[in-house]
Image: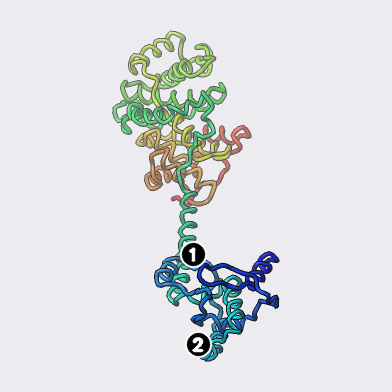
Amino acid sequence: MGKSDENSLGLIGSMNLQGGGGKIMPSANTGPTRRALSNINKNIMEAPSYPYAVNNKRSLSERNAICNKPPLHRPVTRKFAAQLADNKPQIQEEETRKPDSGSSVEAEKVIIDMDHSDKEERDDFNEPMFVQHTEAMMEEIDQMGKEIEMEDADKEDERVINIDAFDEKNPLAVVEYIDDIYNFYKESEEHSCVPPNYMDNQQDLNERMRGILIDWLIEVHYKFELMEETLYLTINVIDRFLAAHQIVRKKLQLVGVTALLLACKYEEVSVPVVDDLILISDKAYTRREVLDMEKLMANTLQFNFSLPTPYVFMRRFLKAAQSDKKLEVLSFFIVELCLVEYEMLEFPPSKLAASAIYTALCTLHGFEEWSKTCEFHTGYKEEELRACARKMVAFHHKAGTGKLTGVHRKYNTSKFSYAARTEPAGFLL
């Protein structure tokens, strides 16, 4: 209690209370007004019979108001309660005695002093026992609330992140339309897919020959330093053309070279000349043969080269995974291993891209990881990707062995951070 409080209590204690109008007059008695706690306790339960004393007892409605809200102060201590129990006979004896007129002023001082200085203890003592139980219950509820808040905080960590928040002011990111664009990609990707058994209609070709052609084109693409989009579109053009037109074995490389030319014309700024493509094919074909095949392929595909490939999904899904350079390179290494494999044609481009990123995450972190943000933006749950991811891990295990090692050699360089040397996620198998 500060000095100002003590002065105010001393001033109140040195005043007389007048009846009727309640006028306060100063008293000639200027002695000390503060009383010991034991003396105050004697008067806590006393019903004052003085005509001018302040009645500090509460009505039933006031007590009910207290019971309906948590106490504002600390509960009665054990020491305080024991002291009250020891003074109980004295309190009852005080109630049976009538005070004399000489002690009225002193009694008024004690009651008023107690009303201002020890109000906290009196209020707590007058509280029923079930109010204290309510306080304990409220504390327990508060503790449960804190635990629920902690659980909610954990769930907050799993909420879907706005991956386009940092690109809102970038006009090239087209944040206003990005969701519509990828929804359109998901709807139209079925047109870029081919039957997974289309090789059955080719009389002179098989899936092994397709793998050799694509493995060679990956190396050509790397040596020409072409854009990544060009590689994925080249393979898409080859598969769609072979699914619709029969080709003899000796023309298969011509189909691959021409598909690369068409993809470069669609994606690249600087297109390789036809003579360069003839040179890399060891002059097996003439310029006229290349141009004739270009016409045949463009007409067979109805000049439709605007189809989503795994690459367009890879870019969006990597952003959802908040990827760094290591995750990005490893994801592209895994998905390019799948380009060579004929059996991976059963998966649509979006699922191929999502599975490659999921496999890369598991490979780098050593456990299965697929966030709510990835699930939201890819449209695939973790269990939907496991079958495809297992095949990818198997391809990763055998990369660099056998004859089809073009992807492994490409990603076993410093340019691609030696991603091919990463240990595969064997636990997924």
Residue 376 or residue 280, whichever sits in front: 376
**Residue 41 image point, x, y percent:** 57, 82
Give the residue type that dot 2 points to.
Answer: Glu
Residue 227 or residue 89, whichever sits in front: 89
Label at residue 95: 2
Q: Nearer the viewer, mark 2 or mark 1?
A: 2
**Colouring of the image:** rainbow
Residue 155 in the image: above or below residue 74: above
Observer able to see residue 153: yes
Q: Quadrant of the N terminus?
A: bottom right
* Disc 2 residue crowd, few under 14, some 14–19, many 20+, Cα 10 Å: some
Residue that lies at the very extreme toward the top in this rendered image:
288
Residue 379's quadrant in the figure?
top left
| Residue occupying the point 49% across, 68% down | 71
**Residue 65 image point, x, y percent:** 42, 67
Q: CA distance from mark 2 to mark 1?
A: 44 Å
**Residue 247 image point, x, y percent:** 35, 21
Residue 364 in the image: above or below residue 352: below
Along the horizontal axis of the image, is 417 left or right of 390? right
- Disc 1 secondary structure class: helix
Give the residue type that dot 1 points to.
Answer: Gln
What residue did someone put label 1 on? 143
Quick check: marks 2 and 1 in contact, CB under 8 Å? no
Residue 162 or residue 130, whichever sits in front: 130
- Disc 2 secondary structure class: helix
Between discs 2 and 1, the one toward the N terminus: 2
Residue 352 in the image: above or below residue 305: below
